[in-house]
Amino acid sequence: MHPIFHLLPNAPRPVAPYSHAVEAGGFVFVTGQLATDADNDDLPLPEGIEAQTAKVMGNLQRVLGSLGLDLSHVVSVRIFLTEFNRDYAAMNALYATYFPADRRPARTTVGVTGLARGGIIEIDMVAARP
């Protein structure tokens, strides 16, 4: 089976040359999303980790929804933070509200030196196609 590459019209505008998601082997690999505005890319990123986390999760939900999926299909998450020590606890508190306690995806969170567009958080996901 060949991979399926998705560039979605209602997802946030790519900030680099990539697909929003790629399907292969029953899995959907969703490209990392920033806190950009999917409807108006000219808007600045929101301030603070809570606002950026919420916007990133909304963007990820938008990509998943365009593919007939939602957060219940997510099996793995990677989170990248530019200010790990400052933002980790607040990000976790908000992130936890998106998944039931007994159905949280596998996850890796790392600190990074920088993200595109001056973002302070980026999240990518892998979902299982039912």
Image: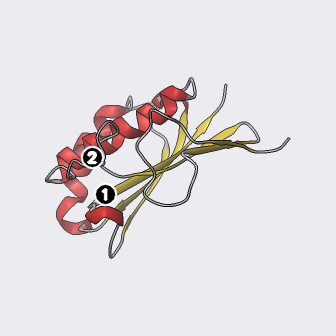
What residue does disc 2 label? 53
Based on the displayed image, in which of its 4 quarters is residue 5 positioned?
Answer: top right
Q: Residues within 10 Å of mark 1 (few under 14, many from 20)?
A: many
Q: In terms of secondary structure, where does tag 2 sit?
A: helix
Q: Which mark is residue 42?
A: none
> What percent of the width, then of the height, locates residue 97?
29, 33
- Between discs 1 and 2, the one toward the N terminus: 2
Q: Nearer the viewer, residue 27 or 89?
A: 27
Q: Residue at x 45, y 32 (%)?
A: 10
**Quadrant of image for the C terminus:** top right
Mark 1 in CB contact with mark 2 (< 8 angstroms): yes
Position above or below: 97 against 84: above
**Quadrant of image for the N terminus:** top right
Q: Residue at x 54, y 26 (%)?
A: 69
> What percent of the width, then of the height, locates residue 38?
35, 39
Based on the displayed image, in which of its 4 quarters is residue 114 positioned?
Answer: bottom left
User: Looking at numbered disc 1 in the image, what kind of residue is underneath it?
Assistant: Ile
> What percent of the width, then of the height, locates residue 128?
63, 35
Q: In terms of secondary structure, where does tag 1 sit?
A: strand
What residue does disc 1 label? 121
> What percent of the width, then of the height, locates residue 96?
31, 39
